[in-house]
Structures are given as C-alpha cells and as structure tokens.
Amino acid sequence: MRRTLLKSAVIISMDDTIGDLPGGDVLIEGSRIVDVRPSIDVGGAAETEIVDGTGRIVIPGLINAHMHTWQTGLRGYAANWTLLEYFRRMHAGLATVFRPEDIYIATLVGALNQMNQGTTTLADWCHNNPTPDHTDAAVRGLIESGIRAAFFHGSPKPEPKPGEPHFSEVPHPRNEVERLLAGPLADRDGLVTLGLAILGPHYSTLDVAMHDFRMAHELKLIASMHQGGGPAKTPGGWEKLIGAGLVGPGINIVHGNDLPDELLDRMVDLGVSFSVTPENEMIQGHGFPITGRLLKRGVRPTIGIDLESVLAGDLFSAARVALSMQRALDNAESRKASGTIPATTTIPVREALRWITTEGARMLGREDQIGSLTPGKLADLVIINCSDLNLVPVHDPVSTVVMQTSLANIEAVMIGGVWKKRNGRLLAEGLGAKKELLVQSGRRLVHDIERQGHAA
C-alpha cells in the first residue's frame, strides 16, 4: 500500500483532540491518514515516501461551500453588475447560449484552479443544465479534474418563451436526479457525489418547494437553495415547509441576508446549515453577510466563492473578507453602544479557518471523512511554504494561514492520498490546451450574447 510520511512540519490539525503541533508528522496510508503526532518512526520502510516538512505548515484541505463553476469562462465579465443585472444578463442572457462543451471546460478549469489554490472539496452549484448533456458535461469536468466535489444538480432560469411555464413553476426533475444516482454519481462516498440545487420557497411556488423538499428527503440528498435577492416568490413558504416537517439537517441556505430573526432562530434550532459568500454578497447587493447573526446563535457559517464571473476564486480571501466584515460590524456596534471599540477582538482568526475546513465538511454531511487532519479521515491536505517572503517570520501559524497566505504559498495539495500539486506546480496534463479551450469558449459566449444585443 502507498505510504507517505510528512515530517517536521507545523501541523494545524483542526482536530480539538490533536490540536496544533509546532513540529509534527502525518502518516498517510493509501487514501487515509493513519497517524498525526510529534514524531512517527517508520523505520527503513522503502515503500514510504518521506517528505521533509521543515519550514512548512500543513492544514486540512479547504472546502469551498458554494460556487457556480460553470461561469469560469466568463471571469470578470460580470464584475460591474448588481444582482438585478446578474439575473437579467446571466440567467436570462449568457446562460442561454452555453453548449455542453462550454460547461465542461469551465467546470474542469474552475475545479483545477480551486485545487491549485488549496481547495480539496468543491460544492459545485450547477444551475445551467437545460439538457442531460449539459449536466453530464459538468460531471465529467469534475471527475476529470480529480477534485473532491459535491455536484449540486440545479435547473436553468431563462425567461419563459410563449406557452412555457416560468421556472418557478417547474419541479426539480426527479428522473434526472435518479439517472445520476444510478450512473456516474452512484457512489455516495465517491470522489464526486450528488446534491440538489433547488429553488426553495424564495424562488419557487409552494407546490414546487414541497415537491423538491420531499424528493430530497426521500432520496437522502442535501438540498441547497439561494435565499435572498428581491421579494420571495412564496411569502410564508418556510413556515409551511417547517410545519410539514421538511426543514432540518440536510437543508442548506445560501446567503440568507434578509432572513428575519425569528425565522433564522427556527432554522438554527432545526439544524439547517448556512453558506455565506461574503465578497459577492457585498459587491452585488445581497446585503451584509449573516456571519455574526449565526455566531450569536451558536452556529458557524460555511464560506463559498460564488461567482468567478465577478471575483477571484481564492477561498483564503473569502474567509478574510467574512472575518474582516464581521469584525467591522462588531466594532461599529460597540462604538454605538459604548463609545469605544471592544476591549479585544470579537472573532479570533481560528474561527475563519473553521469556516473553510471543518464547517464545510459538516455542511456536506462528511465531517467523519474530511475537514481535519484526524487519523481515519481521508488524506486531504495542503502544504504551505511559510519560508516565503510574504510569510516570514511566523509568530502564530493560524494567523499566518488565515491572514497572509495566498496562492503563491501553496506548495502542495493532496486529495485522498494522491498528490495534485507538488513543488508549487499543479499536476495536471495539458494545461495550456485546456486554458486555450476556456479562452475560446469565453470569447464565443460573449460574442453570441452580444450579437443578440445583450452586451455588458
């Protein structure tokens, strides 16, 4: 069996029992971690790869809780759009000219970029799949990339043609979900698994919401939905879903900026998870992230990128934005109440690291498999070169990781015991050709939509 021993590194395990090790080792056998402690001796085992971790920090692989990876070929194109412009120009515009091959290359390159930046698990929220071919193209891109992923199967949101129902009136296609479960995503513990990206009561009729929630419950799939962005399609819908016993663990709310306190209380009590995409929420007009509102209720958020068509895909930056924004709100609240800022920070940096590791695992229902460097869990990890110019000297490794680390410092990435990046280089064949395909796809999409009079 393949074995790897990481030696003499700073270990940030995110496991409360193991803690942080200023100089520790991680032993990996096959796809799993078998030991984490200050010193591991494997003798002269020739089959073990020894990796010197001196001057390195090892952390669990990052978990990106929400991203529309199908938009990778449109990087930066929507940077100046508000949320209302995004609905009109993306969903009713650009999304309608995507071919399956556009979905494939965007998902493939987007997933590779996530691995390059330290993300080992991606929650890919694919809601531009008008045909099974589009869906299969996205799944193929994820599988080919080698990333661990939850493929959240969604539905497109174009303007209806004459005689067609509005997307809010269309139930999630059960036949497609069952096809995926019987085919490429049959393994519930596989590298790429299935979730549902449903409309939810904010964007659908009550009948559709009831159908979709019941289907998720019956098939035992996580149901994730956007909450926010204009008035709700079904006012009072959440109360009816709660009354029907359909809201609880396995339900994931994305954004949630306008959730009233009473409803948020009920959701927290029922075990709902929450994914905030802080940078995009502030840029496009969703409102302030609900990070602090969740923390006050004793629960933590997960963090997602959301849209590379708007901003960068760097999860460290997203965590920093969430942390900085909430500290700013807390400081302002303190000034208003007492005339001065708090005596000490309201949120330590370790909290932000939890949001992109252990909490992401919990949201996906995989906290027993990923999210921390714990014996028995899958060997998903990131090695950071803390001898780099922008990181030395390291006084507090957790602060270095959260507040200073960037793509430039990601030396290696491992997923399931397999190296995906080594010595600062992504181990993916034909990157040049893949990038060129992405460029061609993006140019054609923009050309096609601008030809139709929908210029940005």
Image (cartoon, rainbow, N blue to C red):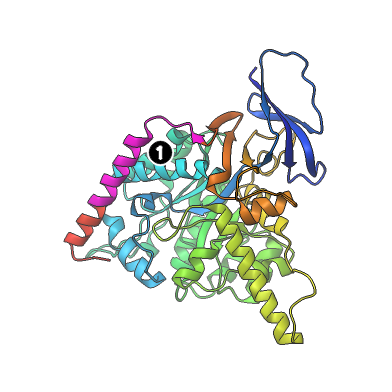
Relative image position of residue 320 (x, y in whole percent): 60, 60
| Number of numbered labels in the structure image | 1
Say whether residue 36 is visible.
yes
Image x and y of residue 268, in percent: 68, 64
- The quarter of the picture where residue 373 lies is top right
Vertical placement of residue 277 versus 135, above or below: below
Q: Quadrant of the C terminus?
A: bottom left
Residue 386 on the magenta segment:
no
Q: Is residue 5 above or below residue 273?
A: above
What residue appears at the point 58 percent right and 34 percent down from the top-left corner?
Answer: 415
- Can residue 205 be seen? no
Left or right placement of residue 430 versus residue 381 in this view: left
Q: Is residue 100 left or right of residue 391?
A: left
* Horizontal relation, residue 236 to residue 42: left or right: left
Q: Is residue 438 magenta?
A: yes
Where does label 1 land, which residue?
141
Could you say whether the residue bearing mark 1 is in a helix, strand or loop? Answer: helix
Residue located 36% across and 40% down the image? 137
- In the rendered view, tell whether residue 158 sits above or below residue 153: below
Residue found 22% across the figure and 59% down from its top: 449
Left or right of residue 33: residue 430: left
Count residues near mark 1 (Cα–Cα under 10 Å), then give few for <14, some for 14-19, many for 20+: many
Q: Nearer the viewer, residue 264 or 26?
A: 26
Q: Main secondary structure of the magenta part?
A: helix
x then y, percent, for residue 22: 79, 41
Q: Based on the displayed image, in which of its 4 quarters is residue 348 positioned?
A: bottom right
Q: Nearer the viewer, residue 207 or 130?
A: 130
- Magenta stretch? 425-444
Instruction: Identify residue type, mark 1.
Output: Gly
